[in-house]
Amino acid sequence: MATNQSAPYKVYLEENEIPKQWYNVRADMKNKPAPLLNPATLKPMTVDDLSAVFCKELAEQELNNDDAYIPIPEEIYNFYKMYRPSPLVHAEFLEKALDTPAHIYYKFEGNNTSGSHKLNSAIAQAYYAKKQGLKGVTTETGAGQWGTALSMACSFFDLDCKVYMVKVSYEQKPFRREVMRTYGASVTPSPSDTTEIGRKILQEHPGTTGSLGCAISEAVEVAVGTEGYRYVLGSVLNQVLLHQSIIGLETKAALDKLGVKPDVIIGCAGGGSNLGGLISPFVGEKLRGEADYDIIAVEPASCPSLTRGKFVYDFCDTGMVTPIAKMYTLGHDFIPSANHAGGLRYHGMSPVLSQLYADGLMRAVSVEQTAVFEAAELFARTEGTLPAPESSHAIRAAIDEALKCKETGEEKTIVFGLTGTGYFDMVAYEKYNNGEMSDYIPTDADLEKGFSSIPDFGI
Ligand SMILES: *Cc1c(COP(=O)(O)O)cnc(C)c1O
């Protein structure tokens, strides 16, 4: 494929080349993602239904399957200017270490204080909350990146921010917690005794280290029960993928500048927002029959929603307070093994990505965490940046693809999303460095337990 041997190491777009609109891939999908349903009536959620939980304008974006482009409001654009455009990097040192004929590029989203791509959607969600005259927002955070991003966004627009943080991360990552508090957020370990659902989960699973699904239930309960508050979510939702499309639009613009067309596009998949954002414009071309790409979602073997989950309607949270979504799911009760250190712990997957996967527009692989940290270490030592464990799933798959090229002699161009930095994940790195990290692949019987929590909605 066409590559530019004399490509610069880093490609920055100009400030005025930051995209002025988000791209909504749903507009180009023949099979639209299945609608969110009210679990009681099984009727599709309307903007009015969703507006009880989300800001009005975000509820509209959630249901908008028609507009291919949605303008980025000036206030959001101005915030983007502080840390965007993000660099597209030609990983020439990694290529050399692998001795591969492949060309590897990565889009680096970790160059802001929150350390990940999540700020792209956090600032949009905070803006619409402010515009609606709200007092504040509630949310959950797993590894902590989303909570950090939202804290930054809320402080910028002077909104209150209540974060429910998965207990295991709260304990393992005290410094993330303090970053959030520095930006003015309040942080509660989940499950907590501050909500009805939290108390119930604590009673049923004493000593639980928590899960994202459980923290979501708590945050939704508080948002719905507090005047002037709404709930915001950092992944999974259509609106979040829309905001994250800025990653893919910039990537495509930078590659176009270089005259490079990628063969393989790789991203890690937790709830699917970075991958969805990265691939959106490329999938759009695929859907319109203009180009073809090999798109790979990478997930942990210990939380294999796409590769081993079921494509059915399920709750987005453990407490069953959210609408139901049709997605690849391990069951809303699924909690990954406690030895899993690398993030990407969510039981479900973005309905957009789920549909694209079901339609054969992308494929998925799962990787084990020791192999992920091996890749992280090699990447840190060659390219300099200490990657987030989540991002390192994509690095692993990119390395594997590049090594395949070494065998076949193919000069493929591989692009992957480097979603963030790992400075707050040193407990996980410590385990790896001490040789104490192990892999756990759930057995079919383990997965059956999670599947049995999926209600039969008769649809
Ligand atoms: C949250 C996060 C992810 C996974 O979330 P997606 O919604 O699947 O993108 C990946 N990498 C980093 C650094 C994150 O913070």
Image: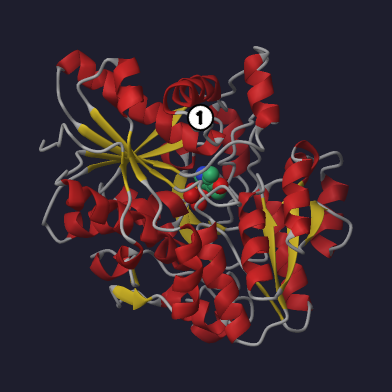
Q: In the shown orientation, is residue 358 left or right of residue 163?
A: left
Q: Does the residue labelled 1 lie within 8 Å of ligand 1?
A: no
Q: How is the image coloured?
A: secondary structure
Q: Which amino acid does label 1 sit on?
A: Ala
Q: In this view, does 14 lie to the left or right of 187?
A: left
Above/below status of 424 relative to 453:
above
Left or right relative to 384: residue 285:
left
Residue 54 placement (x, y as % from top left): 59, 76
Q: According to the image, label 1 marks what residue?
A: 301
Give coordinates of residue 237: x percent, y percent. 49, 63
Q: In this view, does 174 lie above or below 240?
A: above
In this rendered view, identify the residue nearer to me: 346 or 143: 143
Q: In which quarter of the image is residue 25?
A: bottom left
At horizontal 18% and vertical 54% (from top left) the residue drawn is 286
Quarter of the picture containing the N terminus is top left
Foreground of the two, 191 or 97 = 97
Q: Is residue 97 above or below residue 75?
A: above
